[in-house]
Image: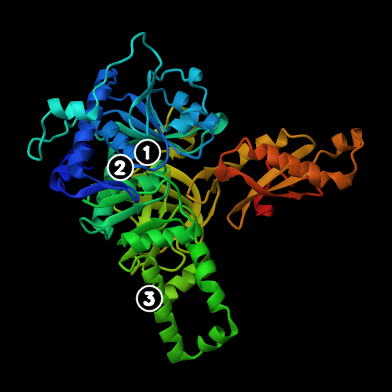
Amino acid sequence: MIEEKLIVKLANSIREYWDLPALTDYPGPAMNYSEAAGRILWLHRIFKETGIKKGAKIALAGKNCSNWGLVWLSTVTYGATIVPILANFSPEDTQHIINHSDAELLFISKDKYDNIDADQLRKVRYVFSLDDLGILEEKHGKNQLALPSYDAFCETEAFSKDSFNLEDVCDNEDIASIIYTSGTTGFSKGVMLPHRSLLANLIVAHKNLLFSVGAKVFAFLPLAHAYACSFDFLYPFTRGNHINFMDRIPAPKLLLAAMKDLQPEVVLTVPLLIEKIYKKQLQPTLETKKMKVLLKVPGIRNIILKKIHDKLMQAFGGNIRELITGGAPMNAEVEHFMKKIKFPFTIGYGMTECGPLISYANWQEHRFESSGKQVEFLQIKVDSKDPQTIPGEIRLKGEQLFTGYYKFEEATSEVLRDGWLYTGDIGTMDKDGFVYIRGRSKNVILGPSGENIYPELVEQKLNNMPYVGESLVLERNHQLHAMIYPDFEALDSDHIPESRISKLMEENRTEVNKQLSDFSRIIKIQIASEPFQKTPTQKIKRYLYS
C-alpha cells in the first residue's frame, strides 16, 4: 500500500522548485512554479465561488497549453475530479462526455465551445474559456457571478514559498481523473483513476526516468491521454522540469526544429513519428547502392553507423538521454536499426486502466521486440501453460489499477474479476519479467497518438450508409481501411450496375468521415466479393482479414 499522498507531493514540489520555470506555451514566455502556485490557489477560489464540492466533476476540453495544466492541477488538488477530453474528439463526442461524466464546470477552448450545443449540457453550471480562464457562460443562475481576476486575487491573498500549501483533502482511493477512451454513446467508457494509480505511476517515474531537475520537456502528445498526462506533465512537474507545450503533434520537420531549440533530455513520442523520421531521413540514404556496399565492410560499417547515431542525436537536440515510445507497436525494422546504431530509445506498455504504465525498461536494458519489464506495485500474470513461450491473456493486479468504468458496471465486471484486470492483450513474459505483446484479443485499434479507435463504432456508421451490406474496419500501415460487402439485393432492386459500386462506396466513405473524429477516419475502401466469415454467434472472424 502506498503511504504517500498526491496533493502533498505536488505542494512539496512547487515549494522546492519555486523559482524555476515551469510552464510555457512554446515558443512563448515561461511561467515559474511560484506563479503556477498562485494560479492554482486562484482557481481554487473560483471553484469555491461556483459551489464546487469535493468529488465534483470538472471537464477540460482543449489542446495542450499552460492553462490546461493549471486547470488539471487545480482540480485534482482541490479534491474534485478532472475529466480531460481529447481535443480532436468530434463536437458530438465532446458534448456526450461532458454530460455522461456529470460535469458541473467546463473549461473549453472558445473554438470548440462554438461547435457544441451548449443548451444540451445538462449539469454544467459555468463555462470557462481555456484560452484566458475567463467565464464564457453562466448556465444556471439569474445574476452574473462576480469572480476575482488573478491580479485582484493576488492583491488580497498574500502567499510565499514558505507559506504556500495545499490542503490534503483526499484519500488515495478518491477518484482523481475520469478518462474517456471513446466519446460515442454506445462505446463510452470513462476510466476512473484514483489518486493511488497516479501516485504509483509517479513513484515509478521518479525511480526510473532520466529527467534532470530543470531540464526542458517538450509536451506535444495530447495531454488528455493518460500516457502524456502522466509522463509529459505530472511527473515533470514534480521533478522541477520546464514543460513546453505544443498544441498538436508536429510534422517530423517541425519536431526536429523544436528539438534543436529546446535540447530536451527525454522525449516521449509514438512509434509512428519515429518511423516517419526513419523512412524520410535515413532510409533513402541507407538503400543507395553505394551505402549497401559500404555497410558490408566491417570497419567502415561501424564508422557509418556511428555517424548516423551522432547525426540522429543532433537531430533530437544533441542532449537526449532517452527516447520513450508507447501507445502502439513499433515497426520491427525501425526498432532493429535503432538498436543497431545504439540510439537511446525504449518501448513501454500501458493502458488507460493502469494510469497507464504496465512495463518499462531503460534503453540500455531494453530487449528487442519487448515492451519493457513489469514495474513496481504491479503484478503481471500471463494466462498460459508456459508464459515464456505460449502467448496468453495478460492479467494485472496492483496499485495502478483503475476503480472501474464510470456508470458502466457491466463493462467493469467484464474486465475486473477476482482482483485482476483482464487486459484482453495477448503476450508472453520471460523469466526476467520482460513483456512481449503478441496481439490483441480486443478489437480496439490505436490511433497515431495512442487514441483508442473502436472499429465497431465506425462499422455501425458505415452499415447505415446506402447499399452497404456489412463492413469490417482494419488497421493497415497505420491507417484505417474498410472492407465493405455491398448489399447486392438493394443494388439489383435499384437497377444499379456493378460498375458504379466503387463510386458509391467512396461517397459513403466521404460522408462517414464527416461524422468521425479525425484520428478515426477511413482512408481507403476495399470491396469484398463475398460475405465475411462469421462465428456461430454471427461475429465476423476478424483475424482472417488482418
Would you name the residue on which mark 2 appears? 198
Q: Which mark is residue 402?
A: 1
Q: Residues within 10 Å of mark 1 (few under 14, many from 20)?
A: many
Please, is residue 499 above or below residue 126 in the view?
below
Q: Nearer the viewer, mark 1 or mark 2?
A: 2
Q: CA distance from mark 2 to mark 3?
A: 36 Å
Residue situated in front as seen by the camera: 229 or 71: 71
Q: Position of residue 109 (x, y in %)?
A: 42, 33
Quadrant housing residue 388: bottom left
Amino acid, disc 1: Phe
Residue at the left extreme of this rendering? 162
> Which of disc 3 and disc 2 is earlier in sequence?
2
Residue 89 image position (x, y, % from top left): 51, 37
Where disc 1 sits, the SS reads loop
* Residue 387 in sight in this render: no
Quadrant in the picture for the N terminus = top left
Q: Nearer the viewer, residue 166 or 350?
A: 166
The correct choice, above or below, for 380 with respect to 340 in the image is above
Comes first in the chain, label 1 or label 3? 3
| Nearer to us: label 2 or label 3 | 3
Q: Is residue 207 visible?
A: yes
Q: Please provide percent x and percent y for residue 23.
A: 28, 46
| Distance (Cα) linking label 1 and label 2 | 10 Å
Where disc 3 sits, the SS reads helix
